[in-house]
Image (cartoon, rainbow, N blue to C red):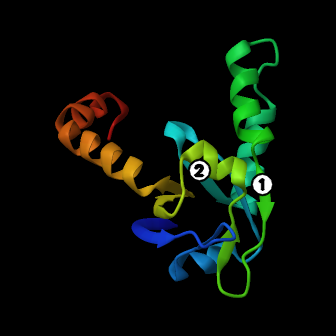
Amino acid sequence: MFIGEYAHNLDDKGRLSIPAKFRSFLSQGVVLTRGLDHCLFLYSKEEWRTLAEKISQLPLHQKKSRAFSRLMLAGAWDVELDSQGRVIVPEYLRTYAGISKKAIIAGLYNRVEIWDEESWQTYKQETEDASDDIAESLTTLGV
């Protein structure tokens, strides 16, 4: 399970250190892809297979299904952690997420999100400000 929020810097080669407590879950490799809200999603290979299978079952005749499939699958990057626990974030993914130097790595149970630090702070503040409304809207889901 991935939980917590960590600040890390990308180095000049586009490498990003993954928090030590996440590394054991990622020892078989990771998949990095475009996420929602202009962040990146990082999945273990096992979790990625599960998600990719579900995405591949979306109805091809629906425009939004095709768009979501393209966002997630075409943008995916298969990568291994190096000996220092870093992953290479390709330029097209850094550009998509607006990450130039400082990144926030957020654990979200079965995935990790990687955000540009400034974008994360803005998003987090907006979410915290609306937390009562968000919580109330989720009561119908049993949360």
Disc 2: CA contacts within 10 A as few (<14), some (14-19) or many (>=20): many
In the image, residue 67 above or below residue 36: above
Pointer 2 or 1: first along the chain: 2
Mark 2: secondary structure: strand
Q: Is 121 in front, or is 42?
A: 121
Q: Residue at x 71, y 47 (%)?
A: 92
Question: Which three-letter amino acid code belongs to the residue tagged 2?
Answer: Leu
In the image, residue 136 above or below residue 108: above
Question: Which three-letter amino acid code belongs to the residue tagged 1?
Answer: Trp
Residue 25 at x, y = what percent?
63, 74
Residue 138 at x, y = what percent?
31, 33
Q: Quadrant of residue 64?
A: top right
Q: Is residue 106 left or right of residue 45?
A: left
Q: Residue at x 65, y 81 (%)?
A: 85
Q: Is residue 129 left or right of residue 73?
A: left
Disc 1: CA contacts within 10 A as few (<14), some (14-19) or many (>=20): some
Find disc 1 in the rendering and name its residue.
77
Q: Quadrant of residue 71?
A: top right
Q: Residue at x 76, y 70 (%)?
A: 29
Q: Is 10 in front, or is 84?
A: 10
Q: Residue furthest front?
A: 12
Q: Residue furthest bottom?
A: 83
Find disc 2 in the rendering and name its residue.
40
Q: How many numbered callouts?
A: 2
The answer to whether the residue labelled 2 contacts the one labelled 1, judged by CB atoms less than 8 Å apart, is: no
Mark 1: secondary structure: strand
